[in-house]
Image: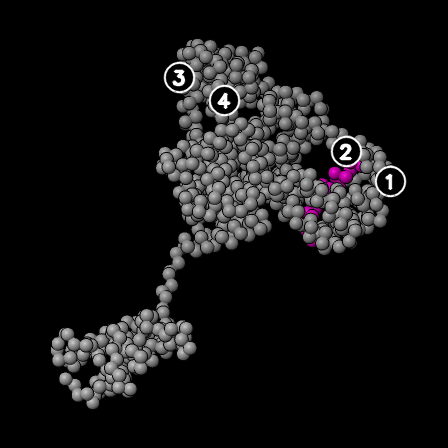
């Protein structure tokens, strides 16, 4: 038993241990995250912990010796200076009036924060190990500001450029998931913008596989999303249905996901709602496209009213900066021609307002708020309504002429603008004729998209008797088709091919595409993917022999310098010169069925065999319609003719007659099918000796029935 005189005092051995511990603590506190000696903080901590464990073991051994080696005595009984006996805390931390542990690093032993003597410097340091970020983590963090900026600016090209610059193409499925999940928790405007962005990025930036995987991830996460977004099931079903309508998801996506999802999951509910409530409804495509009201969520009439109000407010307050800000906030750059038109009309109605209107339009042009093409379009619309304006404003024509001259001289209206002169009666008549032609052309194109009747459209064009406007018709045809579905785009290419054989010269078609490329920047304001679509039309024209590859060089030489259409032309060259370009471009507007050519050929062969054995014309026609591949109907014609030769049964020609009569197979597709048989006659003759004679009889029958274009040649000699 130790002498009582030594109680409360440190032994020499304990003093030495205290000195070592204090020295180690000072080394630790002075050490930086990486010490000058090359050691790390974690290494020093490890060394210190080892020394502390050794001290604890030595203290325990000393306690055992002082207690006489027994285990039943009171541990570490000490006396304070006041003479009271105090039990020391576990691990030797001490009690009230004691020094505590030599070095106390446990957070449990820290001072009470409510104690008046609390000192934050006495708190133990806690070292937290920072997690190492992965490329996927970096990607997920980077796409959020891209999406936020896109929702703020609506700039599709900027979003695409930023996404490309990230350089992580394999992670784009996470972008799809993040974009849709962020949009689902926002307003209809952002939902529409998200759908527009996905359609714009599809194929060029994000592959179809990553689009599909992104929606799969959303279906898997729908239970978690439902915590924050109460109507997530319905909204995600809308996004999926919209993606199917926009041809970025194949219809088969729904059936594949139904097979992999649990019957009781919310993901299964999403798929069922998309399939039964949205994609099965009549006119579902139009309804889905308008469900979120477009990117502006306002009607045309509402925008016109806002334009009128801001112009009247400007004339009242004469604040050009505020007026420009209001025009910018409209967020409708494709509709700025309406601002120009209404501003000019107000200027002509009130002579006192004319100078203010000129100032505003000049300022908007100089700030690049209103583009030169929108400015010219606005002036052109005023020209179209000058006769009506003259009824209310007798001096409308002279006032307008003054405004045009001032705008051109000050540089905010392009000098190429053709306007009415003082003695411009001839120009007036020409303008009226052109306006009437455009109106008739648009009407004919809409009628063609409904009827798919190529001969009727050609007949109507001949009746107009305005061959000088043929390039304008081509521009109208392709511009209208670009703003529609794949069916109309395919029909436009088919019509262009027919017109090139029947009515339009190569020069007409070249001029038409030059006009389209010159106005590509303006068209892109209304049709986001106009550049890509126009490139496809050009490449398809080369594949269809409407244009020769050399014509692309001719078009390039006639484009203005630094024209945005030059990039589109280069894309068309690449598409037309790629491997298997013919097959790919012939299927580029195939309606999104996802069928391979071999699958389609197999279906065509089976339906023709079934018709040949059963003879049900109506059912065969219905099957051809359900293929949804009008661009591939020439294969139906080819296989039908070959089958008639092989089986020596010409009843199948009755099916072609019915298909032509109902408009299922166009004259262009019929001619193309006959051409393919004609080109393969040498091979057919090896198996069918009288193939040539039979084919000539079929051609004669087809010409009598009006199936073939007059230009179809029957030269079949070797």
Q: Which portion, as a residue range, is magenta?
A: 366-386
Majority SS type along the magenta span: helix
Query: What residue did someone put label 4 on?
Result: 625
Depth check, front residue: 302 or 472: 302
| Extreme-bottom residue of the structure | 5
- Residue 240 in percent (x, y) is at 47, 38
Query: What residue did someone put label 2 on?
Result: 431
How many residues crowd around disc 2 within 10 Å: few (fewer than 14), some, or many (20 or more)? some
* Residue 395: mark: 1
Q: Are marks 1 and 4 in contact (CB under 8 Å)?
A: no
Q: Secondary structure at mark 4?
A: helix
For the N terminus, the quadrant is bottom left
Q: Secondary structure at mark 3?
A: helix
Q: Quadrant of residue 13?
A: bottom left
How many residues crowd around disc 1 within 10 Å: few (fewer than 14), some, or many (20 or more)? few
Depth check, front residue: 248 or 215: 215
In front of the other: label 1 or label 3? Answer: 1
| Residue depicted at x 40% and y 23% | 602
Q: In whole angstroms, how far apart are the C-alphas of marks 1 and 2?
A: 20 Å
Query: What residue did someone put label 3 on?
Result: 686
In front of the other: label 3 or label 4? Answer: 4
Taking the image as drawn, is residue 597 in sight?
yes
- Say if 298 sits above or below 104 in the image: above
- Residue 533 in percent (x, y) is at 56, 37
Q: Quadrant of residue 494?
A: top right
Q: Earlier in the sequence, mark 1 or mark 2?
A: 1
Q: Is residue 618 magenta?
A: no
Taking the image as drawn, is residue 414 in sight?
no
Q: Earlier in the sequence, mark 4 or mark 2?
A: 2
């Amino acid at each position: 038993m130790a002498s009582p005189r030594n109680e409360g005092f440190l032994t020499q051995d304990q003093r030495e241990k205290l000195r070592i511990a204090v020295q180690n603590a000072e080394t630790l506190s002075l050490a930086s995250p990486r010490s000058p000696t090359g050691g790390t903080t974690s290494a020093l901590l490890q060394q210190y912990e080892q020394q502390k464990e050794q001290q604890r073991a030595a203290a325990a051994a000393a306690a055992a010796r002082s207690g006489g080696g027994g285990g039943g005595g009171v541990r570490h009984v000490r006396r304070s200076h006041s003479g009271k006996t105090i039990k020391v805390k576990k691990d030797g931390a001490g009690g009230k009036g004691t020094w505590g542990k030599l070095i106390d690093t446990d957070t449990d032993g820290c001072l009470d924060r409510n104690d008046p003597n609390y000192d934050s410097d006495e708190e133990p340091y806690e070292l937290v190990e920072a997690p190492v970020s992965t490329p996927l983590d970096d990607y997920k963090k980077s796409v959020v500001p891209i999406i936020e900026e896109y929702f703020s600016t609506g700039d599709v090209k900027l979003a695409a450029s930023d996404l490309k610059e990230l350089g992580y193409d394999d992670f784009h499925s996470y972008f799809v998931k993040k974009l849709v999940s962020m949009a689902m928790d926002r307003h209809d405007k952002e939902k529409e913008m998200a759908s527009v962005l996905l359609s714009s990025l599809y194929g060029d930036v994000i592959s179809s596989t990553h689009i599909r995987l992104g929606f799969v991830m959303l279906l898997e996460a729908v239970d978690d999303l439902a915590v924050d977004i109460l109507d997530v099931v319905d909204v995600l079903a809308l996004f999926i249905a919209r993606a199917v309508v926009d041809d970025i998801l194949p219809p088969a996506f729904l059936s594949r996901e139904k097979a992999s999802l649990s019957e009781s999951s919310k993901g299964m509910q999403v798929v069922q709602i998309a399939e039964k409530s949205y994609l099965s409804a009549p006119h579902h495509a139009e309804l889905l496209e308008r469900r979120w009201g477009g990117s502006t969520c306002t009607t045309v009439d509402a925008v016109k009213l806002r334009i009128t109000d801001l112009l009247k407010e400007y004339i009242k307050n004469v604040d050009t900066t505020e007026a420009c800000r209001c025009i910018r906030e409209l967020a409708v750059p494709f509709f700025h021609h309406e601002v120009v038109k209404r501003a000019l009309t107000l200027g002509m109605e009130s002579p006192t307002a004319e100078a203010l209107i000129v100032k505003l339009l000049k300022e908007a042009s100089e700030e690049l708020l209103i583009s030169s093409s929108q400015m010219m379009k606005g002036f052109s619309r005023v020209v179209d309504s000058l006769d009506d304006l003259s009824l209310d404003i007798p001096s409308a024509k002279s006032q307008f002429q003054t405004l045009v001259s001032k705008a051109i001289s000050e540089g905010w209206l392009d000098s190429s603008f053709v306007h009415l002169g003082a003695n411009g009666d001839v120009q007036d008549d020409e303008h009226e004729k052109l306006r009437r032609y455009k109106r008739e052309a648009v009407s004919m194109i809409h009628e063609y998209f409904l009827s798919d009747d190529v001969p009727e459209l050609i007949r109507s064009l001949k009746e107009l008797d305005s061959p000088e406007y043929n390039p304008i018709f081509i521009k109208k045809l392709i511009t209208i088709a670009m703003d529609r579905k794949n069916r109309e785009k395919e029909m436009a290419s088919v019509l262009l091919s027919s017109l090139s054989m029947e009515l339009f010269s190569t020069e007409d078609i070249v001029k038409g595409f030059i006009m389209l490329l010159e106005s590509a920047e303006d068209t892109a304001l209304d049709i986001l993917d106009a550049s890509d679509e126009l490139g496809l039309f050009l490449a398809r024209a080369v594949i269809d022999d409407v244009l020769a590859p050399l014509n692309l060089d001719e078009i390039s030489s006639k484009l203005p310098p630094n024209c945005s259409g030059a990039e589109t032309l280069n894309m068309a060259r690449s598409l037309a010169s790629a491997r298997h370009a013919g097959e790919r471009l012939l299927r580029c507007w195939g309606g999104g069925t996802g069928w391979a050519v071999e699958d389609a050929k197999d279906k065509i062969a089976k339906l023709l065999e079934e018709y040949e054995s059963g003879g049900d014309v109506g059912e065969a026609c219905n099957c051809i319609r359900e293929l949804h591949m009008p661009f591939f109907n020439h294969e139906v014609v080819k296989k039908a003719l070959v089958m008639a030769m092989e089986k020596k049964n010409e009843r199948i020609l009755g099916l072609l007659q019915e298909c032509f009569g109902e408009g299922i197979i166009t004259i262009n597709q019929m001619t193309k099918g006959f051409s393919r048989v004609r080109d393969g006659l040498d091979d057919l003759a090896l198996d069918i000796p009288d193939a040539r004679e039979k084919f000539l009889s079929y051609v004669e029958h087809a010409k009598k029935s009006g199936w073939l274009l007059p230009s179809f040649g029957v030269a079949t000699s070797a």
